[in-house]
Amino acid sequence: MSKSRGNVQDPDDLVGRYGADTVRLFLMFMGPWDQGGPWSPTGIGGISRFLNRVWHAALDPRGVDPGDAESGQLPAGQDREAAEKALRKAAHQTLRAVTAEYAELRFNTMVAHLMELSNLLQRYRGTAAAGTEAWNEAVRLLLLMLAPAAPHIADELWARLGETSSIHTAVWPAVDESAVAEDEREVPVQVNGKLRDRVMVSMGIAEADLEALVLARPKVVAALDGREPLKVIHAGGKLINIVVR
């Protein structure tokens, strides 16, 4: 934008319409801070909607969207315990990413990660997971991560949640590595070095149990075609290779 070309836009107009936090986040989200780019207000409404989702997640966790058939329902095949685990994992994964992004001034990806977490909270809003300890932890972590970039709304919501001191005096949270640890892994299965199947197993599965599981898989049974394995090679838990004649 250039003053000589007469295309300068006063940010006060946008601040008056959307608020300072929305404008600040939008400027962060537009692209890498050190690369610049053409100005366009297109998309600022998305930032405004994001902050509205944060507001509703913090203050109305049990609300539902009447226009969404899935609103208020846990995802298929998931119970409350699984939902709480998913919330904690997502919140601490986001915290790990956002901590690094603030340090490296990658503000656009930082905002994107906060949006993803708010979307997940929106998905669980109104379900059995809403208002639980895991939910409350995820909301508070979201506000703490948001505070440096959107200080006004973060501090307002922090106070409305019952905190007596400003969010800006709070200590930056630490990642709970146990929450983000993977509890399953994918193991490729080869027969004579040729990939035949992939199986998801728990991280702590014993080699004997893993071998029995693999040998019973329909694709592996078909590949063996009645032949007895000469050797089953466990490559450090990264793959299994079944050797036959």
Image: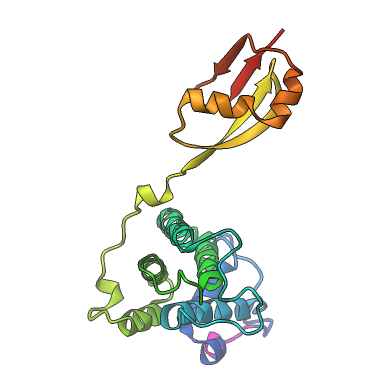
User: What kind of secondary structure does the magenta stretch mostly adopt?
Assistant: loop
- Quadrant, the N terminus: bottom right
Residue 183 shown left or right of residue 14 in the figure: left
Query: Which residue is depicted at the point 30% across and 75% down?
Result: 167
Residue 185 shown left or right of residue 70 in the figure: left
Whether the magenta-drawn stretch holds residue 9 is answered as yes
Query: Which residue is depicted at the point 31% across and 60% down?
Result: 173
Whether the magenta-drawn stretch holds residue 7 is answered as no
Q: How is the image coloured?
A: rainbow
Highlighted magenta segment, given as a residue range: 8-12
**Does the rendering let one see residue 238?**
no
Vertical arrangement, residue 128 with respect to residue 220, above or below:
below
Query: Which residue is depicted at the point 70% across and 15% down?
Result: 192
Residue 224 shown left or right of residue 14 in the figure: right
- Quadrant, the C terminus: top right
Residue extending farthest to the left is 164
Q: Closest to the observer: 187 or 163?
A: 187
